[in-house]
Image (spheres, grey):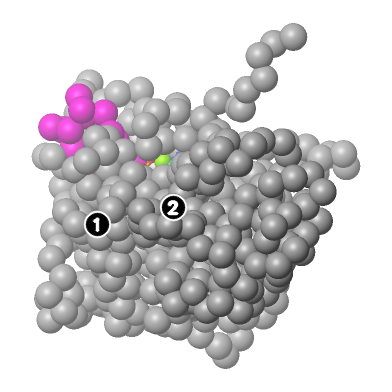
């Protein structure tokens, strides 16, 4: 039999890493609540057509990265490669955008068939944030401030913010022709990918990660020289709010996004620590997407955080240890298991959130004490015949060198309440 293993690029998150994930998730959710965002839970699988129509046929995602399959009725389904399309679908389906603004978030796995490397998986996780019904630069700015607050809360420094405006569809159309002329004149310097993009999505050439392409990209004409008046105003207003709020940013006129639906504001937060996989959060405005699905025009803006990449940047010492048990219950005879279970239940009930591990299986007192110590518990409680006969429990502080005490239940609970920091 072949060795059992997970699919390439799809990873287990093991127990030593889950506290880090939980910490990051909890902190992000706290911040999103501060800004009035509400959670929406979406399916992981959608009709393939939703993604081809939303993201665009000629994007990397749709042309080569999607996990598509036919179900038993020969309907083409796709594992979601991103969350915006499903969120827009749900919003239209449930009438969430009719005369309402919405601030939504979702989190979960996304799937893209890419070449796996550090910071790039085939199953990865995003926290996505979307705001619908807000046309102005105020919400773009607030989103960026919110992201900055998230980094702050996670203790992440040294992220660089890049912003740009992609203008309206019309101004992009004009610029597109200018780019086609330019890159056609430099055809011999283009790589294979870019030659394909030249035909069907020339803006995306600017997004090339190929080092050999960077100099021809650097000399390309700039979109912001061809921006329409209104987009220019929107962008200037956004910058003014960021300036007033003390947010530093670089305007990168070559910043385009990998999905077709973006227009006007786009932004990325980038770290220098993860090499080519440096973008930890990316987003922008997509005012045309809702309408393109046949619904009433609804302005929209959003971003997605790449969880694996962000988690890489979180320092171990900001993560409080929330896992260690408070007490480990040592059981000194097989006949006492039932009493130990009942006593553990009583403790969990008397002190809310108390973490209690009850010893199960064989093992003498000495080996149980070793296990208790290894578990990281603060106290070992000993249930033995003598204790049971007297209605008492013995307690030993595993972290301070003090004598073992024998207490009755009330005294014990008082002591635990006083000495354990449980909120
Ligand atoms: P990249 O340029 O790195 O491929 P992208 O432009 O395809 O990113 P988006 O679709 O904007 O990425 O997704 C938002 C964020 O999700 C990215 O900035 C990144 O942090 C994360 N992300 C995207 N693809 C992957 C992946 N394959 N593995 C891990 N994280 C990813
Ligand atoms: Mg990508």
Disc 2 under 8 Å from ligand 1? The reply is no
Q: Residue at x 11, y 39 (%)?
A: 219
Q: Helix, strand, or loop for circle 1?
A: loop
Of the pair 99 and 363, the residue shown nearer to us = 363
Tell me the quarter of the picture where residue 227 sits: bottom left
Of the pair 399 and 5, the residue shown nearer to us = 399
How far is mark 2 from mark 1, CA to CA?
A: 34 Å
Return the x and y of residue 131 as percentages of the image width and height. 46, 75
Residue 277 visible in the snapshot: yes
Return the x and y of residue 258 as percentages of the image width and height. 39, 47
Q: Is residue 209 left or right of residue 115?
A: left
For ligand 1, which image quadrant applies? top left
Q: Residue at x 44, y 52 (%)?
A: 398
Q: Is residue 59 left or right of residue 412?
A: left
Residue 199 visible in the snapshot: no
Say which mark, if any, is on residue 398.
2
Local packing at callout 2 (Cα closer than 10 Å; few below 14, some 14-19, many 20+) is: some
Q: Are marks 2 and 1 in contact (CB under 8 Å)?
A: no
Against 407, residue 212 (above or below) is: above
Q: Assess whether residue 223 is covered by the magenta stretch.
A: no
Say which mark, if any, is on residue 164.
none
Instruction: Report the span colored magenta.
Output: 202-217
Query: Disc 1 marks which residue?
Result: 156
């Amino acid at each position: 039999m072949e060795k059992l293993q997970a699919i390439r690029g799809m990873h287990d998150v093991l127990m030593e890493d889950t506290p880090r994930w939980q910490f990051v998730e909890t902190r992000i959710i706290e911040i999103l609540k501060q800004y009035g965002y509400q959670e929406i839970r979406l399916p992981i699988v959608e009709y393939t057509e939703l993604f081809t129509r939303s993201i665009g046929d000629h994007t990397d995602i749709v042309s080569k990265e999607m996990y598509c399959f036919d179900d038993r009725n020969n309907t083409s389904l796709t594992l979601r490669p991103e969350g915006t399309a499903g969120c827009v679908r749900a919003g239209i389906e449930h009438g969430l955008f009719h005369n309402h603004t919405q601030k939504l978030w979702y989190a979960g796995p996304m799937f893209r068939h890419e070449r796996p490397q550090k910071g790039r998986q085939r199953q990865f996780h995003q926290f996505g944030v979307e705001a619908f019904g807000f046309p102005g630069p105020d919400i773009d700015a607030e989103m960026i401030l919110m992201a900055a607050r998230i980094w702050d809360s996670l203790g992440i420094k040294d992220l660089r913010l890049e912003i740009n405006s992609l203008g309206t569809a019309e101004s992009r159309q004009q610029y597109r022709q200018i780019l086609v002329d330019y890159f056609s004149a430099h055809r011999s310097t283009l790589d294979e990918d870019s030659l394909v993009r030249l035909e069907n999505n020339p803006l995306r050439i600017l997004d090339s990660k190929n080092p050999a392409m960077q100099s021809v990209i650097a000399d390309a004409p700039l979109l912001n020289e061809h921006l329409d008046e209104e987009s220019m105003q929107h962008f200037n207003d956004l910058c003014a709010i960021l300036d007033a709020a003390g947010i530093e940013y670089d305007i990168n006129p070559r910043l385009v996004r990998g999905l077709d639906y973006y227009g006007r504001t786009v932004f990325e937060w980038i770290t220098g620590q993860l090499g080519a996989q440096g973008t930890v959060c990316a987003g922008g405005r997509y005012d045309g997407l809702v309408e393109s699905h046949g619904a009433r025009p609804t302005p929209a803006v959003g971003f997605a955080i790449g969880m694996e990449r962000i988690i890489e940047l979180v320092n171990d010492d900001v993560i409080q240890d929330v896992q260690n048990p408070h007490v480990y219950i040592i059981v000194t005879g097989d006949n006492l298991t039932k009493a130990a279970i009942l006593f553990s239940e009583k403790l969990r009930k008397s002190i809310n959130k108390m973490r209690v591990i009850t010893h199960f299986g064989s093992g003498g007192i000495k080996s149980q004490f070793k296990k208790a110590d290894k578990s990281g518990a603060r106290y070992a409680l000993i249930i033995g015949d003598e204790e049971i006969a007297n209605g008492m429990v013995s307690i030993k502080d595993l972290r301070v060198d003090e004598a073992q005490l024998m207490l009755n239940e009330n005294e014990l609970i008082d002591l635990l309440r006083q000495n354990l920091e449980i909120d």
